[in-house]
Structures are given as structure tokens and as C-alpha cells.
Amino acid sequence: MKRITVIIASLLIAGSAFSTYSTITLSWDDTARSLTIGRRHGSFDGMEKTRTFTVNVLGEEKTAVYNGKETVVSF
């Protein structure tokens, strides 16, 4: 299984700079031909609660609506 972590960040500047972020781990399983979009960790003000992921594997495209909970896209 291959993993990538996506970091979605917001940089806030108010006198001093600091950042807040959320992470989403993506895991590809070659045997099952599936992508697992993991549970979101962290949050920040103004963060989109729902995202749409478009996944393309060798020309086959699928769309997944993601709300922060683990989601599996199978091919």
C-alpha cells in the first residue's frame, strides 16, 4: 500500500505569524485497486467542511464527496 499525506493549510497573521492546518492521508492499494481517503485530522477557521476529489486511474475517472470521514474509491 502506498501513502501520501495532503496538508491543507491556512496562514494567519495578527501581529505575529502562525499557521493552522488539517491533514488527509491518501492510501492506494494495488491489489484492491482502491484509494482510501483517510479521516481528516485538524481544522482551521474558514476550512471547507466538504471537498470533492476527482480520482483518475489510467483514464478511468471517479468522483468522491469527502466530509472528513474515511472514504474509499474503488476501481
Image (cartoon, rainbow, N blue to C red):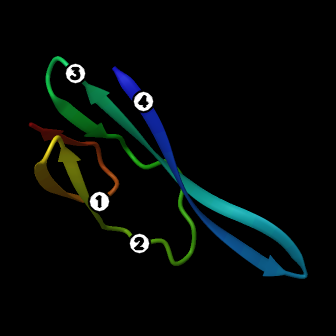
Residue 41 location (% of width, % of height)? 49, 48
Tell me which label, 1 or 4, sits earlier in the chain: 4
In the rendered view, does 62 fall on the left or right side of 12? Answer: left
Residue drawn 80% across the image and 79% down it: 13
Circle 4 sits on which residue? 3
Residue 70: which quarter of the image?
top left
Residue 25: which quarter of the image?
top left
Structural distance between the alpha carbons of marks 1 and 4: 20 Å
| Cβ atoms at labels 1 and 4 below 8 Å apart | no
Tell me which label, 4 or 2, sits earlier in the chain: 4
The amino acid type found where label 3 is placed reads Asp
Query: Nearer the observer, disc 2 or disc 3?
Result: 3
Circle 3 sits on which residue? 30
Tell me which label, 1 or 3, sits earlier in the chain: 3
The amino acid type found where label 1 is placed reads Asn
Residue drawn 12% across the image and 52% down it: 61
Dot 2 lies on which element? loop
Query: Nearer the observer, disc 1 or disc 4?
Result: 4
Query: Nearer the observer, disc 3 or disc 4?
Result: 3
Dot 4 lies on which element? strand
Tell me which label, 2 or 3, sits earlier in the chain: 3
The amino acid type found where label 4 is placed reads Arg
